[in-house]
């Protein structure tokens, strides 16, 4: 693997997105390698699967915008559906999955965290869905999972304004579950959590987890992919993505 590092510790395994130069932005290779890990097997001793980002700044700062420049609407819908499928696999994974967020979790990065079952954040973390700044919309389940966690009203506010949440706000809103002063304390929590699970029957762990995982539903995902396609086919998206890549403010023609 090139963009991910898979490590095994005493009672848990960890995936680290290893693209610190691009703030761990999720490119096609990250998705392919994540799919590979989720389709494989972990050591029997692993009771949790942790996902985190490398470097000091980010969990993941979104989908990799450099892959958006010349994407057709149909290719964008395929990209959305492929990402949704992999995140769905993550959401239904046979072990509890933990997003360990220490820094930016934006756009696709937040959508990845939302597909994990538990979100741990450190004090310096920033969570948000900035897609509309690029005249895009979330395409990897964000429009479906965020309302389930923070309620429709807040999901509409944060998605449509692109306003970020700081760590306290994220926990108060329910977008994150546990807040830690720093990464070291979050890691101790993970070690203790995994150790507690190592004393339980793996059968009852699996059954309880599966029951909780099936408490959701998936009606709006197809609509999200269709609208992701429409955003890609509109001229404002080219301006939004182009402006980001050229490091300038976008000038949208439809306001
Ligand atoms: N896709 C591709 N590259 C990205 C990226 C993304 N989503 N987010 C950051 N990067 C790259 C930057 O282009 C930059 O690359 P460079 O050094 O080659 O110029 C590098 O990562 C560092 O980012 P930079 O913007 O210089 O860091 P910063 O600390 O000034 O700002 C952010 C951090 C997260 C606020 C800013 O990078 C950002 O807004 N990123 C995009 C977030 C976004 O819109 N995500 C949703 C995508 S749909």
Image: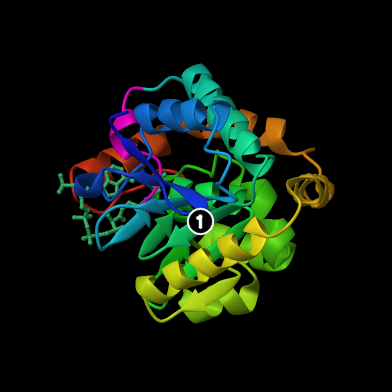
Q: Residue at x 32, y 28 (%)?
A: 1
Percent of width and height locating residue 91: 65, 43
Q: Residue at x 41, y 28 (%)?
A: 33
Residue 247 left/right relative to 18: left
The overriding secondary structure of the stretch rendered in magenta is: loop
Q: Is residue 63 above or below residue 33?
A: below
Q: Nearer the viewer, residue 24 or 136?
A: 24
Quarter of the view holding residue 239: top left
Percent of width and height locating residue 36: 48, 25
Percent of width and height locating residue 200: 73, 57
Count of residue discs = 1
Q: Residue at x 64, y 65 (%)?
A: 196
Q: Residue at x 51, y 81 (%)?
A: 168
> Visible in this render: residue 227?
no
Q: Which residue is mark 1?
A: 99
Residue stretch in magenta: 60-70
Residue 187 left/right relative to 96: left
Q: Nearer the viewer, residue 34 or 70?
A: 34
Q: Is residue 158 above or below residue 12?
A: below
Q: Nearer the viewer, residue 232 or 176?
A: 176
Give the SS element for disc 1: strand
> Visible in this render: residue 69?
yes
């Amino acid at each position: 693997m090139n963009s991910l590092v898979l490590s095994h510790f005493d009672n848990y395994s960890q995936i680290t997105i290893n693209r610190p130069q691009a703030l761990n932005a999720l490119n096609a290779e990250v998705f392919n390698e994540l799919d590979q890990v989720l389709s494989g097997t972990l050591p029997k001793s692993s009771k949790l699967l942790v996902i985190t980002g490398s470097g000091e700044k980010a969990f993941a700062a979104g989908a990799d915008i450099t892959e958006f420049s010349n994407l057709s609407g149909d290719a964008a819908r395929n990209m959305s559906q492929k990402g949704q499928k992999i995140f769905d696999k993550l959401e239904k994974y046979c072990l509890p999955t933990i997003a360990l967020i220490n820094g930016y979790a934006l756009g696709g990065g937040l959508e990845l965290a939302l597909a994990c079952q538990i979100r741990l954040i450190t004090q310096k973390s920033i969570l948000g869905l900035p897609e509309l700044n690029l005249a895009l919309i979330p395409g990897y389940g964000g429009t479906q999972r965020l309302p389930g966690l923070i309620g429709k009203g807040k999901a509409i506010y944060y998605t449509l304004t692109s306003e970020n949440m700081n760590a306290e706000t994220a926990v108060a809103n329910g977008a994150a579950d546990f807040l830690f002063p720093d990464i070291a304390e979050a890691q101790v929590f993970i070690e203790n959590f995994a150790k507690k699970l190592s004393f339980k029957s793996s059968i009852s762990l699996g059954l309880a987890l599966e029951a909780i995982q099936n408490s959701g539903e998936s009606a709006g995902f197809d609509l999200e992919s269709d609208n992701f396609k429409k955003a890609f086919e509109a001229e404002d998206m080219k301006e939004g993505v182009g402006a980001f890549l050229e490091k300038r403010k976008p000038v949208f023609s439809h306001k």
